[in-house]
Image (tube, rainbow, N blue to C red):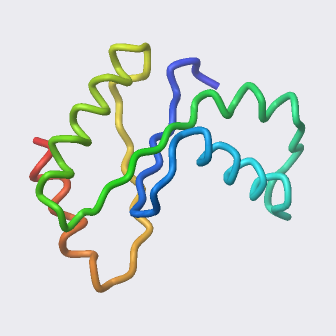
């Protein structure tokens, strides 16, 4: 895996990156879809996981997201961004506004 590859999870649930790593690790360890899961592999990967609280309906969220992504880049994260949006159809429209607000 590219050493610059990192994941920024975003959600409305208040938690910090450490809590996010713990919850994600527990889910990965229990998942039937996780192949070759190992504690040592997870220990290396979890350092690449980050989390921030955000609500796509809040206009103040987008400048905060930009700042967070810029901070991650300054700390060695890849400047390439992939957005995966898992959301109900009821908020799909506002989700697509992400691209406009991040430009």
Q: Nearer the viewer, residue 67 or 34?
A: 67
Outermost residue, bottom side: 90
Quadrant that contains the C terminus: top left
Horizontal arrangement in the rendering, residue 74 relative to residue 84 (left or right): left
| Quadrant housing residue 102 | top left
Q: Position of residue 80 (x, y in %)?
A: 35, 30
Horizontal arrangement in the rendering, residue 55 relative to residue 14 (left or right): left
Q: Position of residue 30 (x, y in %)?
A: 85, 60
Q: Position of residue 42 (x, y in %)?
A: 78, 35
Q: Residue at x 41, y 23 (%)?
A: 78
Q: Residue at x 89, y 43 (%)?
A: 36
Horizontal arrangement in the rendering, residue 99 relative to residue 29 (left or right): left
| Quadrant housing residue 57 | bottom left
Q: Nearer the viewer, residue 1 or 7?
A: 7
Figure disc tally: 0
87 lies above or below 64? below
11 lies above or below 88? above
Q: Residue at x 64, y 25 (%)?
A: 1
Q: Nearer the viewer, residue 56 or 96?
A: 56
11 lies above or below 75? below
Q: Position of residue 61 (x, y in %)?
A: 21, 52
| Quadrant housing residue 39 | top right
């Amino acid at each position: 895996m590219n050493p610059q590859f990192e994941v920024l999870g975003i959600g409305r649930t208040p938690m910090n990156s450490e809590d996010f790593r713990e919850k994600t690790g527990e889910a990965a360890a229990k998942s039937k879809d996780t192949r070759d899961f190992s504690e040592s592999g997870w220990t290396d990967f979890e350092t690449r996981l980050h989390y921030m609280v955000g609500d796509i309906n809040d206009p103040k969220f987008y400048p905060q997201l930009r700042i967070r992504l810029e901070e991650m880049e300054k700390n060695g994260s890849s400047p390439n961004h992939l957005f995966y949006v898992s959301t109900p159809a009821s908020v799909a429209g506002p989700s697509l506004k992400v691209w406009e607000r991040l430009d």
